Amino acid sequence: MAGSDFLLNYLPILIFLGLAGILGTLFLLLPMVLAPKAPDTEKLSTYECGFEAFDDSRMKFDVQFYIVAILFIIVDLDVAFLFPWAVVMFNPELGADRGFQIFAFWSMFVFLAVFFIGFMYEWKKGALEWR
């Protein structure tokens, strides 16, 4: 009897896995059935980063695409550091003593200040302007 109670605790997980499998399969198969199939040469052509994919490999291209990608990664990492910090900092059950909270606050302030200074530098240099 105790074993069945133990296994009954895992029933919601099994239901969740079953629903996830059914929905995942449904979302993969449904577009194959319902989506219109009218391919043309333009739709089937390869497109990469704003320039033709099958051109001369030594042609000049705009590095703006890569700068935007790098800035996106930097902002993404900033949020990745900020979110767990905010959860621990502002949750009284997870937070540490008062001295640690003050240290954590000023550490994040310095981190965000360096990020903001770098962002302003990029803005002044025109890296965010699309030419």
Image: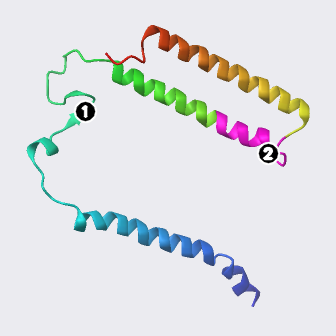
Closer to us: mark 1 or mark 2?
Answer: 2
Q: Is 21 placed above or below 64 here?
A: below
Estimate the x, y position of residue 35 in percent, counting from the top left: 22, 61
Estimate the x, y position of residue 124 in percent, counting from the top left: 48, 9
Q: Is 103 placed above or below 3 here?
A: above
Instruction: Specify whether 46 is left or right of 89.
Output: left
Residue that badge 1 annotates = 48
Residue that badge 2 annotates = 91
Which quadrant is home to the C terminus? top left
Q: Which amino acid does label 1 sit on?
A: Glu
Image point 78% across, 23% down: which residue?
106
Image point 64% across, 17% down: which residue?
114
Instruction: Specify whether 60 is left or right of 66.
Output: left
What is the number of the mark on residue 13?
none
Q: What stretch is highlighted in magenta?
A: 82-95
Instruction: Specify whether 60 is left or right of 77.
Output: left
Badge 2: few (under 14), some or many (20 or more) residues near its Cα, within 10 Å?
A: few
Q: Which amino acid does label 2 sit on?
A: Asn
Q: Is the magenta stretch mostly helix, strand or loop?
A: helix
Estimate the x, y position of residue 5 in percent, counting from the top left: 72, 84
Q: How far apart are marks 1 and 2 (CA)?
A: 44 Å
Q: Residue 88 in magenta?
A: yes
